[in-house]
Image (cartoon, rainbow, N blue to C red):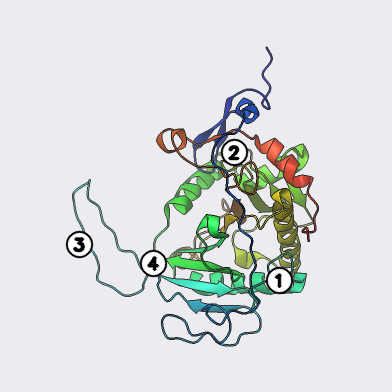
Amino acid sequence: MTFNPNEHQHLRYNPLKDEWILVSPHRALRPWSGQTEIPAVERVARFDPTNPLCPGVVRASGVQTPKYESTYVFTNDFPALLDEGPEPEESEDPLFQTKSAKGTCKVMCYHPYSDVYLTSLSTKEVVDIINEWVRQTQELGKKYLWVQLFENRGQMMGCSNPHPHCQIWASSFLPNEARIKDDNLKSYFQKHGRPLLQDYVAKEIKKQERLVAENNEWIVVVPYWAIWPFETMILPKKQIERFSDTDEVQREALARILQVLVAKYDNLFKCNFPYSMGWHGAPTGPQLAESHPHWTFHGIYFPPLLRSATVRKFMVGYELLAQAQRDLTPEKAAAMLRAQDDTRFQ
């Protein structure tokens, strides 16, 4: 019997995290008798006088959200990180280590209307969002070592507010995912003399197997090492280290490809496709003036859906106790997304 990656189990290596993923494509043929759900009917009002993210509404903190007309950013009323606070005592015990954690958390509203999203906004409005992302990461990056911009879309991902928004957490420390990526990107660069993700972009464009969308400046792929069924990465064709390195042409092209990606996601199962997304680039703060040629700025989308709008992938059992495992191959997932229309269904 000849090995076929679309039919036979195998391991795939993730060079960004130095870990392996088990791929079991033959399991995708098994009948499904697990959890199913009735999709929620999402009817969002343009303005909700009780929604704290809507213009003019008073938030729980007593602060009134101004009547903004484009994007709006404010410090989270209930932040996970604060700039003030007592320092923990240092310990020499190797089993009970504590370190200082300082930072700030912000909320960014994309638009004053609650019933819009990237696919229904104009490209210019999406560029405005991207420009604000850049401004926020630049400003916070002057002080903090890491600035994590992220968005949780949909109740399935724990988003309790339907208003289009994201969060920005800036920290005095390098979070685990960033630290692990930094180590592995640096190791590859030291060995090969080139950025790992730029080598990866060139090979994915050549292979075309996992490509979802492409324009002059960016590509969207389902990574070779993807864990989530329809996980994607947004990668630049030209080497850039941070969000702030993008120019006007790249930002407009990014806006367009984001609109295409979200449309393809929504079209796949005819729903508002849930996901967690975020952006990774070179560390900032005290490392802002340093060169980081091993870092390539990129975006990541982690959607939970597997078979339909109601059947999701759960990271349980083997995934929690051993290692990540997937049934649907990245190549099949990419083909399914690629086949979707670039304009969202109505």
Looking at the rendered structure, the secondary structure element under dot 3 is: loop
Could one spot residue 159 in this view of the protein?
yes
Side of 175 where 137 appears, left or right: right
Distance from Cα at disc 4 to Cα at disc 2: 31 Å
- Mark 4–mark 3 CB contact (< 8 Å): no
Task: Give the image quarter of residue 26.
Answer: top right
Q: Residue at x 32, y 75 (%)?
A: 84
Q: Which residue is mark 2?
A: 225
Query: Given the image, on which type of amino acid does mark 3 rest?
Result: Glu
Query: In the rendering, which numbered label is found on residue 80?
Result: 4
Distance from Cα at disc 1 to Cα at disc 4: 29 Å
- Mark 1–mark 2 CB contact (< 8 Å): no
Marked residue nearer the N-terminal end (3 or 2):
3
* Closer mark to the observer between disc 4 and disc 3: 4
Task: Give the image quarter of residue 344.
Answer: bottom right
Q: Residue at x 75, y 73 (%)?
A: 124
**x, y percentage for residue 206?**
77, 39
Marked residue nearer the N-terminal end (1 or 4):
4
Q: Considering the image in quadrants, where does the C terminus appear?
A: bottom right
Looking at the rendered structure, the secondary structure element under dot 1 is: helix
Q: Which residue is mark 1?
A: 127
Task: Give the image quarter of residue 105.
Answer: bottom left
Could one spot residue 237 in this view of the protein?
no
Reply above or below: 128 against 237. Answer: below
Marked residue nearer the N-terminal end (4 or 3):
4
Q: Considering the image in quadrants, where does the N terminus appear?
A: top right
Query: In the rendering, which numbered label is found on residue 89?
Result: 3
Marked residue nearer the N-terminal end (4 or 2):
4
